[in-house]
Each structure stands twice: as C-alpha cells, then as structure tokens.
Image (spheres, helix red, strand yellow):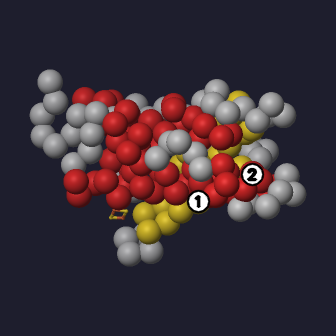
Amino acid sequence: MAKGPYSDKVMDHFMNPRNMGEIEGANGVGEVGNPACGDVMKIFLKINDDQIVEDVKFKTFGCGAAIASSSMATELMKGKKVEELLALTNQAIVDALDGLPPAKIHCSVMAEEAIEDALKNYFISKGQDPAIIEEMK
Ligand code: FES
Ligand code: FES
C-alpha cells in the first residue's frame, strides 16, 4: 500500500538500493550529469567475452527517484546481452518501478543515458566505433 507519490517498489529500491558501488576493472563506465542541479549518475559494467553483463554497479548523487532508477536499472541489466541493454529505456525502468511521478521522470532518463554512455565506452575500450550503438537500436 503505497502512500504519497512513490510506489512500494520505488521506496524499496530507495531504502535498499541494489548493486551500489564501483567495479574495479570495469570495461564500460558511463557517467551523466545534470549541470542545472549538479546531480550525477555513474554506471560500472563488467562485460564478459560472450558480451554478457557479468556485473554492474552504480553510484548516484541525486534524489530518491534517481537512486531507485539506478538500482532498478542495474537489476534489469544483470545477465543481459549487450544488445539487450539498449532496450532498457527510461520507460522500461519506470514500468519496472511501477511508475514515477511526472516531475521525477527525468531522473530515470539519467539512468537510460548512463547505460548508453557505459556501452559507448565499452565499445571504445574494445577499439570499436561507438556509433555501432545507433545501428543496434
Ligand atoms: Fe537534478 Fe532532477 S533536479 S536531475
Ligand atoms: Fe535530481 Fe532526481 S536526480 S531530481
């Protein structure tokens, strides 16, 4: 029984964030920031030779909705193939959280952008053109 504007799932992921921290030796690190408010989200990916997400962690400096969005995003990313990560739009994250208030949607957009940035850097680290992401979409 959710009270207030946040679903039980948002509250759960805010109070008990999953996969918080950093990965040493991550081969894809993404960072997005909102210059207007100074909020920052970082995603660390460890992708194995089969192009599967072996581990993922996040660090977020932002509001509760941003922390819940990052936490849920990492849960959705684990064990996925690289191309499946591109399906993780902010809408997919919001749906998995049973919704976010309209004023907080932009916080989930940060998660989508951080995932894309991490993937971009993963391809760069492999010596590939990160534009490949646009073709995979
Ligand atoms: Fe900074 Fe929402 S106020 S991202
Ligand atoms: Fe700044 Fe949500 S991250 S308002």
Disc 1 element: strand
For the question of whether residue 121 can be seen, the reply is no
Please tell me which residue is depicted at 37% across the width and 55% down the height of the picture.
107
Residue, far bottom: 36
Q: CA distance from mark 1 to mark 2?
A: 13 Å
Left or right side of 37 for 52: right
Q: Quadrant of residue 5?
A: top left
* 8 vs 127: above or below: above
Q: Nearer the viewer, mark 1 or mark 2?
A: 2
Q: Which residue is mark 2?
A: 122
Q: Residues within 10 Å of mark 1 (few under 14, many from 20)?
A: many
Please tell me which residue is depicted at 73% across the width and 60% down the height of the picture.
130
Residue type at numbered disc 2: Tyr
Please tell me which residue is depicted at 50% across the width and 42% down the height of the picture.
88
Q: Position of residue 40 (x, y in %)?
A: 49, 61
Left or right side of 49 for 112: left
